[in-house]
Each structure stands twice: as structure tokens, then as C-alpha cells.
Amino acid sequence: MNRLDGKVALVTGGGQGVGLGIARAMVAAGARVVLVDRINDRVEQAAAAIGAIGLAGDVVSASDAARCVDETVRRLGRLDILVNNAHHVIGQPLLEVSDESLETVYATGFLGTFHFMKAARPHIGRGASIINIVSSVMLKTDTTGFALYAATKTAIRSMTRTVACEWGRDGIRVNALSPQTDSPAWATWSAAHPDLAAKILSEIPAGHVGDAERDVGPVAVFLASDAARYVTGSLVLADGGRGQLR
Amino acid sequence: MELTGRIALVTGSGQGVGRGIALAMGRAGATVVLTGRTLAKLEAVRDELGSGDPIAADMTDRVEIRRVVEAIEERHGRLDCLVNAAYDARVGLFDTLGEADARWDWNSGFAGPLRCMQACFPLLRRSKGSIINVGAATGLKPDTTTFALYASTKEALRSLTRTAAMEWARDGIRVNALIPLATSPSFSAWGEDHPDAYQTILESIPLEYLGDPVLDVGPGAVFLASDDAHFLTGTTLMLDGGRGYLR
């Protein structure tokens, strides 16, 4: 028996990387999946490749969020799982942070998660699971270069906790998931910063950067499944041991 | 006195915790630049203190922040401490909050302090000064109901505090957060709307009283700004009668 049989999942930023890997794992676990991505061609190709539905939408827009959720429910009849993965991250020294980068990192990360949770709310009920993707960067002692990334992920983690508290009695679970995976963004960044990439690799006790589908996907499937019915408001690390909770 | 000859900029100093910190720093010898949106409140704090430099300004706006920093350089020649106390929160159940609430809260409690930190950086590097960001215990509690924005903005500010401490340590600038639990007009107003929750908070304070912004929170800020705290950076000081527990 597949653990997500009968469930419908929507994954933002699903056109590539962590989102696509999680979506693949959810399809394999029996879910019907909708991918949302800013870039139409990318999301259509990705959806075709994994047997999902692709929708073009920008997470910074509340109306795009409502449209994507409504279309998911119209075409698949329900919504059970929401994965808020999309986030345009900019790494730069604090002194170089402009209002443009503030807007980008805040709106694509925090507001995108905010919009999709609100859009999903009328359509989800008991047994639903929301997974907000965060990062072990926010747990690190030295967050040099990641002022906005660490802060917005921290804010998303905190909002995750609040919504879990507020929606728990309606049977809706909300958790944060911190992945450490290979992705196009990681590939580009690590090629441009080989020394920093080597440092990150040295911080991963598992010894390798995870695979989105095989290493992180099963953890997302677990959180989305009824097996995790007593897990909410939590932060789960699927990062090869890089982050430390205390 | 610990802060004699020092110049401190305290945002949101017209009331509440900002006022308490401004008064305590002034009484510890600092010249305090008082900023906030309402000049009359700032002038009242100056009159109470018997000194100080009130400047009405919206400290989330880069142009206004620059005007304040230029005034500080012109009138005082230096800046030793920036205290980011200004914050206008949006509180309510998640289902009742909209994008405008989220943006307002973030701009007030995160983007504003970030812009102030950037604008004060050159003066603080020159003086080997420090920054104090006012956090909130709300984000540390297990049940953050109604605080989807408040808790997340304040926790993001503590994250920013940490990053600035790491990046600016080599410039000789210390950056810390403090988490107060004290009387303030906004806290009192919230207490009137939520008497049971307010009472629960009062009963959960190990030292058995709600702090005074001048007498209980102020001295912590004075300490963080003083040379005695020269080895403290990137950390959070709890000034809450023992209610919270950082770990």
C-alpha cells in the first residue's frame, strides 16, 4: 500500500530542485501532485516527466496562490498536502542588502508561504498536512553572508509553529522541513563558491549532499502521511546531520 | 557613570520599552537621540530626563534614517550605540491577517531595524560601538497563537542580530538582542483586551512582577552598551524576570 494513496498534493517551486524531488517521491507514494512554478515551460516539462499537473504561478501573488489552489481542487477534487518550497534566496553581506533584495527574499519566501496557507485553508480539513521548507542555515552559529536567508527562514519556521497552534484543533498539521540537497541552485552556487561548498560538505556528518527525491522525499512523504498524525508544529531536519536542534 | 560621553540613538523612544531604555541610558550618562513618529512624546521623554535630542522620524524609511544619522554626526560628532526598539506589531489569528498586515509588521520590526543598522554602520565602526535589538519572548513560547507575524518578525530580528554580530565583529561593532518583559502602553492595551492571558503571563513570572521599562529593562541595555559587555556579541539577554528560557 502506498502511503499517500487518495491524497492530493500541491508543491510550490516544483519545477526543479528540492520541490521536484519531493513531488517525485509523493507521486511514487501514490499521491496525485500539482506543481506550481513561476516559469511555465519548466513546470510543464517537470510535470510531464513525473506524471503530475503543472501550473504557472508566482507565489508572491495572493491571487496566483488562490488561482492555483482553486484549479487544483477543481481538477483533482480535493487538497490534502501543501508543500511551500518556493523561495528566491539571495546571499550577500548585510551592508549590501538593498530594498530590492529585501523584497525578493521576503515576498518569495515568507509571503509566498503565507499566501498559499491562506488560499488552502478553505479547502483542507482533518488529516491535511502542510510542509514549509526551511534551511539549516537558520540554525547555524555563523550566518555570515546569509542575513536575509537565515532571517526569513527563521520567520517561516515561527509562522509554521503559530499556524500549527491555531489550526491543530481542526486536524490540520503544519511542520517545517529543513533539507540539504543537490539542486540547480546548489550546483550553480557551489560552482561559483567552491571553497564555501567544500566547507558546507565538511559540515554534513552523512558525508554527502542529499538527493532531493531519495534522501529528503521520504521524509516529506512521512510528514504528509497519516503515519505522522501526531507530528505538528515541529521542525524536522533531513540534512545529513548538518543542523542541530536544541 | 558607565555611559558618560557616549551618544545613543534609541528608536521608538517615545513610549514603552524604548522610553525606558532611553531614560536609563540618559541617567547612566549618555546623550540620547530620541526618535519616534510623535515629537510631543519624544519631547516629554527629554523633559523627564532633563537632556536628550528628540527628532521625529519614521525609522523604517531610508531617507528619514539618513537625515537622523546626518543630524547625529553634525550635532554630536559620533554615535556609540543604536537601540532598535521601534515596532508596530500586527496581532491576530492567522485567518484574520492579510498581506498588508504582514508587510506592515515586517517593515516595522525587521526591515526598519535592518536599514537603521546599515545607516549607522559607519559611525559605529568609528566609535567601536554596539547595537541592541529589542526582541520578544513571544517567539520562544510553545504556543504562539495570534502571533504569526509578531513572533516571526521578532525571531527574524534575532537572526539578523546574529548575522550582523558575525559580519561586523571584525569592525569592532558588537550586536546583541535583549528580550524584555515590561509594562508598556501596547502591552497594557493588549492586557485589557485579553485579561485572562494577561493574568496567566503575570503568574508565570518567577520573580513575581511585571518589569518596569526604566528600572528593570533599562539597566540591561545600559550594560550591553557599556564597556563591561565588551566580550558579548551575537547573543540575547533575557530581561524578563526569569519567565523565558533560552536553550
Image: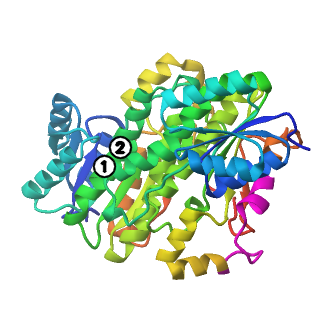
In this rendering, would B215 be left or right of A129?
Answer: right
Q: Is residue B161 above or below residue B100?
A: above
Q: Secondary structure at mark 1?
A: helix
Identify which residue, B218 or A135, lies in the foreground.
Answer: B218
Is residue A69 part of the magenta span, yes or no?
no
Pointer 1 chain: A
x, y percentage for residue B241? 75, 68
Residue occupying the point 51% across, 69% down: B189
In this rendering, would B75 be left or right of A183?
Answer: right
| Residue A49 showing in the rendered view | yes
Q: Residues within 10 Å of mark 2 (few under 14, many from 20)?
A: many
Segment tinted magenta in the rendering = B203-220
x, y percentage for residue B36? 57, 44
Q: Residues within 10 Å of mark 1 (few under 14, many from 20)?
A: many
Q: Point out which mark residue A25 bears.
A: 1
Q: Secondary structure at mark 2?
A: helix
Q: Earlier in the sequence, mark 2 or mark 1?
A: 1
Q: Is residue A80 above or below residue B156?
A: below
Q: Point out which mark residue B2 bears.
A: none
Identify which residue, A207 or B23, lies in the foreground.
Answer: B23
Specify the amino acid type for callout 2. Answer: Glu
State yes or no: discs 2 and 1 in contact (Cβ < 8 Å).
yes
Q: Point out which mark residue A213 bears.
A: 2
